[in-house]
Image (cartoon, rainbow, N blue to C red):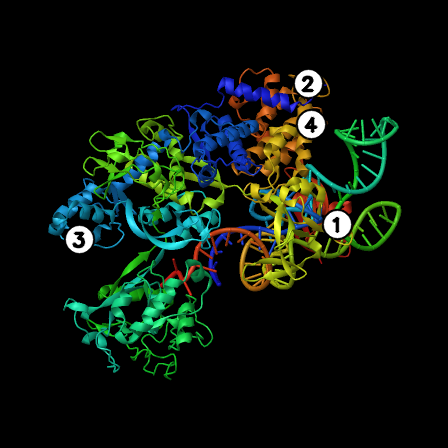
Amino acid sequence: MKEYNFREIEQKWHQNWVANKTYKVVEDESRKKFYVLNMFPYPSGAGLHVGHPLGYIASDIYARYKRLQGYNVLNPMGYDAYGLPAEQHAIKTGQHPEISTFANIDHYREQLDKIGFSFDWDREVRTCTPDYYHWTQWAFQKMFNSHFSTTPLPTSPEGEETPGGKARPISELVAYFEQNGTEGLEQYGVACSEELNFTADEWKAMDEKQKSDTLMNYRLAFMGETMVNWCPQLGTVLANDEVVNGVSERGGYPVEQKKMRQWCLRVSAYSQRLLDGLETIQWSESIKETQKNWIGRSEGTEVEIKVAQTPQPPKGGEQDGSAAETLPLQGAGGAEGLSFTIFTTRADTMFGVTFFVLAPESELVDQVTTAEQRQAVDEYIKYVKSRTERERMIDHTVTGVFSGAYGINPITGDKCPIYIAEYVLAGYGTGAIMAVPAHDSRDYAFAKHFNLPIIPLIEGADVSKESYDAKEGIVTNSPRTPQPPKGGEQDGATAEALPLQGAGGSVEYDGEALVLNGLTIKEAIAETKRFVKAHNLGRVKVNYRLRDAIFSRQRYWGEPFPVYYKNGIPTMIPEECLPVELPAVEKFLPTETGEPPLGNAQIWAWDEANKKIVDKALIDEKTVFPIELYTMPGFAGSSAYYLRYMDPKNDEALISDEAASYWQNVDLYVGGSEHATGHLIYSRFWNKFLFDLGVSKKEEPFQKLINQGMIQGWSSFVYRVKGTQKYVSFDLLETQYDDAAKKNRYFYQGVEADPIYTDVSTVSGNQLDIDKIRAWMPEFKDAEFVTNESGQYIISQSIEKMSKSKYNVVNPDDICENYGADTLRLYEMFLGPIEQSKPWDVAGIDGCFRFLKKFWALYWGKTDELQVTDSEASAESMKSLHKLIKKVTGDIETFSYNTSVPAFMVATSELAQQKCTSRQVLEPLAVLIAPFCPHIAEELWEAMGHTTSVCDAEWPSFDEKYLVESTVKVGVQFSGKVRFTMEFAADATKEQMIEQVMQAEESQRYLQGKTVVKQIAVPGRIVNIVVK
RNA sequence: GCCUUGAUGGUGGAAUUGGUAGACACGAGGGACUUAAAAUCCCUUGGCCAUAACGGCCGUACGGGUUCGAGUCCCGUUCGAGGCACCA
């Protein structure tokens, strides 16, 4: 009897595929392309676990399916090879990170090969090889030499407008400055770090350094002095998405805010396009939502607020009312015309403003503060500075201080006190707000704390207990009917500030005053915007939360910047000299003087004349200059790798125009959702930039995205009593819930016990094998294990992400060894919907293994001879086959692989029962299973006499005619309850079905003594007789 | 707090988009083969009641609603997962 010898079969085909280059793919204009891509892995020292292949298998099935349908399928794989773990390993061992990285890659490759993927390994990329990062550096230089504007500048050769804006050569901006300075620049929507003002003459008068600094304000890759997330333990800055809850994503080390000069990418310029693009791609709703949140578009109004009182005369007396008119005109000189701009999305609430708030970091604070309040303000600023980002995030107690100054609400003419408070963030909007306590909960808390008035503006809103934040309702009180403002009338301990003064009327501008009463909130916002705009009181403004990406790291193991410093001016190493290769260093740590690790490189200076990298000792600041010591962050290499796969060996360009035009973009991208705010934003940005350059042919890089769920493992814990070597059985511990930390804490005899991970091998059931744990790791050798009365040591378990450090990883190699890759592939798909996270459980794998044995037996029976005959298949068998074709084809299209597997199982047992041996059925059957289980499919395909790979067979087409039946079985309901099923002629009409049911013997007991109220029949589905 | 998701047997999960709830697999129980075990095969398996046999009631987190008919649609509630979060 020919057994299903998976080891032999799989090995044979692995060799065969390599020998025949079965998965090599070349551009072919005559065939339609399809590009399938997995997020490439970081090759960690731990190797692959069963979670990794989940997505790879899913995409491999799709790639093979598309190929069987005749598509030219690109399905590449590579490695995201730069990363912190390799560097930390290098620091520890002194071994160059490339050595460990390449060793890990070899291990990954071995593991991947066992699973039988259809990757074209000729296209492999590694982000750390110079031929690859050549193009990362190249793209960076292109960004450096670009600015972004919504409308082309007059100096631009192209006249057309691009929706959402576009990257354009920086030279066009330079030409503009030559002619106009910054005059009129605002109308072109040029993205910048801050608004600058200079004339053409001033520009021409600038020296090289000043020009360089000025242009940095506009470049897409620029050097900027920004607040960065500095992580002292990692010795580097981190991007926003690398910081989670105030600590580093990797390692969980504290992160502080620090002002540093850093390379940045002006991702924010693309905010609107990044947002708009989401509408054109097939991604899950939740990922799109995450990106929308991250981009954080808010449409609002900026309003100019004039400061009523200049700091100098600290007078207590107040004049009333119409202060707006009495203010000195702007430009009259000095600090007299002091004003600031606030940003609000609730322009409808201008009549409810009772104070203003500035962010403590705002430059205005200093200018506004009166001498009287100076000390209090200084103390407050000091306090705010003492607080870490983390503290500010967790602790939301109300703090703030009165500045002594008042702002004038341009709509009402009211004078409102200006406060300084940390709840207003410097980095968002203008760093200044108008506070409407009645309709904003934060303002409300602040007003209650400082006893400031609260003026409701929505009909029926009760603001006695909390603010009314909802954006629904009818506006009232706008302008207010004259009445004394409530609240804060007693000048108690808190009230250094005088609450607002003014009647809340509506100031006339050019004979028009704003009236909002009776409008809905939405209408009122629109009306206020119109009014503000018409009378030049401010402007409509869209704000984005998306910040520019910090693009440099103080690490060794990353792409070096192709930049040198010519007399302090960052200058690009000429394009033709790229790549600038990562230099050798002795030590991977920062230098003694605190420079990044690249400071250790001796051959690291740029000889401008000879265009080469030379010894640092030669630096003379005339022809030889220092090279940048920073390296690029992890996301640099992963931002355009999908393009490089199209043309991985090209040393002239990132990709040839032909390759780009043929492959376009990724049709199907598979990877984890944890990259939603990192890689998936950066690479969309990067691709849009390359699209603007004409390099990439599609604006969005990833047309369809599937997020595979995480495969989790069962982690097991023992509990160590703090400060001892005592481990206590779980059932002896007392559990307390810690609200602040949001987790359980455990105590043994009043002392806290910490959970410690233990290896799965030391656990049986819910008990610990004490001998095994002693043997497992030295630290447990002499530990004391406290067992319960029955002498058992109970462990606790939880489901967590698979990780080496949690000792809960399951290795796919073992599964391949014991069951074969085909079983592994099938089982991982069978586990559940691909997008769902689920714990790994080997228990069910036998079912899949048994199935494959049965499937094998269909072809061989219990003999050594292939049982496939050329006889015609029975109608039954054709029906089984075509049912399967229909199901599997539909399932693959919708990525519901978990339901395809049962369909194969059902078809197999049906065909076995029918004793089907017909080639007519068994051949297409082998093709159908080929995407899922390529090894067994190849073997059977070959056994049936084929000399070419099953990969190049044709996907069977479904024919409805085999499913047509003469009768159908349909449920019969009485009053909505299914009582029995009945066979009907397939073409029976409603009337005939009802007739048949009414006549049927088994119906009578449900009809007896009842009146038929209604009769419903849906052919092929249901009959329902409603009786009473 | 806001947004996105989800909740179905002992377990993983099906259910043609409003039409026979629990496919398929695991586990469990029983049986066959075997001296025995493994392997393989067969039967039972949502709960409760009932039977010689037929059958009946309940059941998709909970409470309502729409409908001839609801796991599926609508309203409300609870719980879980993920994202955003003093973002004005």
Q: Position of residue A795 (x, y in %)?
A: 68, 49
Q: Position of residue A367 (x, y in %)?
A: 25, 68
Tag 1, which chain?
A
Total numbered badges shown on the rendered structure:
4
Tag 3, which chain?
A
- Is label 1 on the same chain as label 4? yes
Residue A421's place in the image compared with A705, above or below, is: below
Mark 2–mark 3 distance (CA, rounded to whole Å): 83 Å
Q: Amino acid at mark 2?
A: Gln
Of circles 2 and 4, the one toward us is: 4
Mark 1–mark 3 distance (CA, rounded to whole Å): 80 Å
Which quarter of the picture shows residue A983?
top right
Q: Disc 3 designates what residue? A: A184
Q: Please, what secondary structure does the residue beneath circle 4 have?
A: helix
**Residue at (63% x, 42% y) in the render:** A778
Q: Disc 4 designates what residue? A: A854
Q: Disc 2 designates what residue? A: A867
Q: Please, what secondary structure does the residue beneath circle 1 have?
A: loop
Q: Amino acid at mark 1?
A: Gln
Q: Nearer the viewer, residue A488 or A909?
A: A488
Mark 1–mark 2 distance (CA, rounded to whole Å): 56 Å
- Is label 4 on the same chain as label 3? yes
Of circles 1 and 3, the one toward us is: 1
Which circle's residue, 2 or 4, is located before the other in the chain?
4
Tag 4, which chain?
A
Q: Which mark is residue A712?
A: none
Q: Position of residue A17 (x, y in %)?
A: 52, 21
Of circles 2 and 3, the one toward us is: 3
